[in-house]
Image (tube, rainbow, N blue to C red):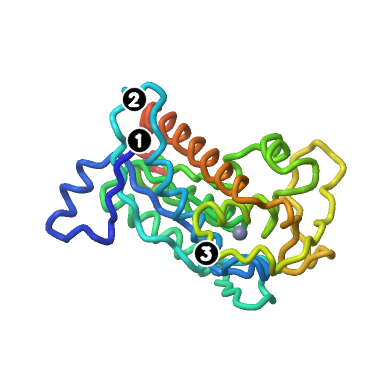
Amino acid sequence: MGELIEATRVTGGAWPATVAESDIAVVPVGAFEWHGPHLPLGTDTILAEGFAREWAHVRDPDGAEAPVRAVLYPPVAYTACPGQTRPWPGTIAIRPDVMLAYLCDVIEGVVAAGFTRVLVVNGHDANMSMVRAAMEWVSGRRRASLLLANWFQLVTPEETTQIFGPQPSRGHGGAYETSAVLGFAPDSVDLGAAPDVPPRPRLDTSSPYVLVESRPTPWEGWSGHISLVTDTTGTRVRELAAERLHDLISAWIAAPLPDEPDARTAG
Ligand SMILES: [Zn+2]
């Protein structure tokens, strides 16, 4: 279990004690991006903020752990978006150089406020490189343990195959992501609005890879098998990913904190 304190509701007078009495800061990072006719433009922000809250409600197995006190910051709602979604209606794409500098300032600002452990809960694939680069920069300047959790990696590919069957379910706007939004914000999903758009198959290799391409036809700014989405898959994805995030935070809190950065590397 965790105890969430809304950073935006803390008075200036109460802020120093709030920081001092907290274990971690949590920063959701989303996007404002086309996800198909069936999903809201705030999909990634809904999910980042949703999971940033949901882990705190997961019960500890034996109920013995002290609750983690977490200060929840407001989400980063605009970010860099890839060429695959930039031209589609509604997407707002921040330039990567602007976004990286912005994230460096946000994360350093949270650490400077007095938090040594900062968790970023991310909802958007293209944020993975940006947030990591910002974390690397801050970690050389200040003593900090910075954890990036991408919600979509919290459930394994084997598990999504168990939930959705053999057809591809992961990917931008697909059944996995759509289920998660359905789990948190069912009123913002219109399952009838999108036909299935079978995604281009993954490369025939077991090697991990990063492939960045222009429009990967068939592609409508999203792809996937929406017909696989049900209320049950929505609940399952929400619960499973939240449990994993809770376990990840517990393991992180149990690990020792780093020492101060080497003065020679700070700059
Ligand atoms: Zn997304």
Is 218 positioned to the left or the right of 175 in the image? right
Rendered image quadrant of residue 93: bottom right
Is 262 positioned to the left or the right of 211 in the image? left
What residue does disc 1 label?
1
Q: Quadrant of ligand 1?
A: bottom right
Q: For mark 3, give the secondary structure.
A: helix
Q: CA distance from mark 1 to mark 3?
A: 27 Å
Q: Position of residue 227 (x, y in %)?
A: 74, 55
Is 216 placed above or below 18 here?
Answer: below
Is 9 placed above or below 250 here?
Answer: below
Which mark lies nearer to you, 1 or 3? 3
Is 150 positioned to the left or the right of 207 in the image? left
- Name which of mark 1 and mark 2 comes first in the sequence: 1
What residue does disc 3 label?
187
Q: Quadrant of the N terminus?
A: top left
Which numbered dot is residue 63? 2
Q: Residue furthest right?
A: 204
Q: Position of residue 215 (x, y in %)?
A: 79, 67
Q: For mark 2, give the secondary structure.
A: loop
Q: For mark 1, give the secondary structure.
A: loop
User: In the depicted view, which residue is nearer to us: 55 or 72?
Assistant: 55
